[in-house]
Image (tube, helix red, strand yellow):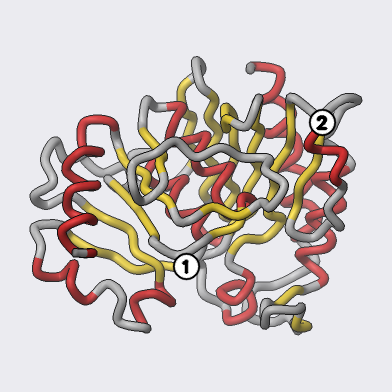
Amino acid sequence: MRDVLSRIDAALDRAAEALAPFTSGQIEAAMKSGDDPVTQADLAVDNALRSTLPQPGEGWLSEETADDPSRLECQRVWIVDPLDGTREFVEGIPEWCVSVGYAIDGVPVAGGILSPDRGLRILGAVGEGVHVEGGDVVRPSSRIQGALVLASRSEMKRGEWQPVFSTPVSVRCMGSVALKLGMVGAGMADATWTLQPKHEWDVAGGAAIVRAVGGVVTDPDGAEVLFNQPSPKLPGFVATRRELIDDVLDLIRRLSS
């Protein structure tokens, strides 16, 4: 894992170089199918990551690269989102990041998150822990009462989080699934979840970081989630520290009933 982390760190350096010519809030975007924006920055970072990370025998899954089914035959696969939170990037909201995940046999075991606007870099691997540069670590909550939960900005606008406000948790909304997950793994929040389907590249890097500190990432019903699937989409997810997972899942069940 140390070699993998070194490669992720180098790839994030390359990503930062690729992003240097672009300014958040001052870039044009085109629309892909599904009404998702894409910019030249997304493509530049994708190229930087793809030219740095994969070695022979390793698969590749990226939001900005045509999917190659041969990845399904690989035990080790890179799952990346060159720019998670492109809408926020285009609008100049500092809630976007570069996300890199590394999975073995479908399990995310190493990841990296780079948030240039926040001066934040998070690296983590199972068995190696998590290293954080920049950002403020909060005192973790040992109970669901007062736990800081990071919520989707778009889900908040749609009113999907309104019932959570009457529960004992504290809620903060922000963009970028990967950034929220990374912040939970880095000790900057206690939990994050979504009941909406998400692509694997949104989740893999941050999920690896959560797992690197002994945290748990499940589907909304508490079952294990596996990556590098033929259809790379998850049915939502829940991510938190191990000691909070039962309470968080119970809270979600009560809100959904």
**What quarter of the picture does the C terminus occupy?**
bottom left
Q: Position of residue 30 (x, y in %)?
A: 78, 83
Question: Is 91 displayed left or right of 249 in the figure?
Answer: right
Q: Position of residue 161 (x, y in %)?
A: 27, 72
| Mark drawn on residue 73 | 2
Q: Amino acid at mark 2?
A: Glu
**Mark 1: few, some, or many residues within 10 Å (few <14, many ≥20)?**
many
Query: At x 58% / y 42%, what residue is drawn?
Result: 205
94, above or below 148, in the image: below
Q: Position of residue 79 (x, y in %)?
A: 69, 43
**Is 156 in front, or is 53?**
156
SS at mark 2 in the image:
helix
Question: Closer to the observer: label 2 or label 1?
Answer: 2
| Mark drawn on residue 175 | 1
Query: At x 49% / y 35%, what residue is drawn?
Result: 209
Query: Who comes first in sequence, dot 2 or dot 1?
Result: 2
